[in-house]
Amino acid sequence: MITDQIITAATSLTAIAIVAFAMLRGWQGWLTLKEHELERIVADARHDGAQRNERETGSALGAARIEISDLKERIRKLEAIASGVDL
């Protein structure tokens, strides 16, 4: 009789431990899934913000090209002044 109770208790305890372990693994998986979702949302928000910022302020590459073009024009004018040619 005592052995039957011990076997039942041990089996119940083992079953509870297995279910608790499975639930813990499921919880960890769910947390990992939510973490990945948050990372994706943050990455998308950063990407959208960068695109919006580029649209509002213009491309940095385009601005650099304009600045280089302005500098080349100034150099041409200074060279013309140095050589005595009126523009």
Image (spheres, rainbow, N blue to C red):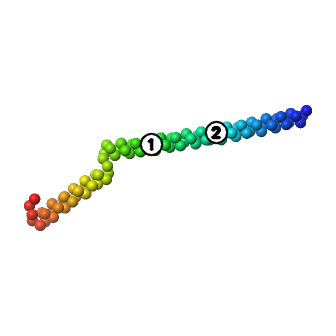
Quadrant, the N terminus: top right
Task: Write the residue at 15% across / 60% down.
Answer: 77
The correct choice, above or below, for 78 with respect to 45 in the image is below
Task: Write the residue at 44% across / 42% down.
Answer: 44
Q: In the visual, does 25 lie left or right of 65?
A: right
Provide the secondary structure element on which disc 2 rests.
helix
Amino acid residing under circle 1: Asp
Disc 2 crowd rating (10 Å Cα; few below 14, some 14-19, many 20+) is: few
Quadrant, the C terminus: bottom left
Task: Write the residue at 31% across / 49% down.
Answer: 59
Q: In the visual, does 10 lie left or right of 60?
A: right
Q: In the visual, does 78 lie left or right of 64?
A: left
Quarter of image, res 82: bottom left
Quarter of image, res 51: top left
**Residue 84 locus on image (x, y percent):** 9, 65
Q: Report how far apart the C-alphas of labels 2 and 1 lie in the structure.
A: 27 Å
Amino acid residing under circle 2: Gly
Disc 1 crowd rating (10 Å Cα; few below 14, some 14-19, many 20+) is: few
- Residue farthest toward the bottom in the current orientation of the protein: 83
Q: Which residue is mark 1?
A: 44
The correct choice, above or below, for 72 with respect to 38 in the image is below
Quarter of image, res 21: top right
Q: Which residue is mark 2?
A: 26
**Residue 17 locus on image (x, y percent):** 74, 39
The correct choice, above or below, for 58 with respect to 3 in the image is below
**Residue 72 locus on image (x, y percent):** 21, 60
Task: Write the residue at 46% across / 44% down.
Answer: 43
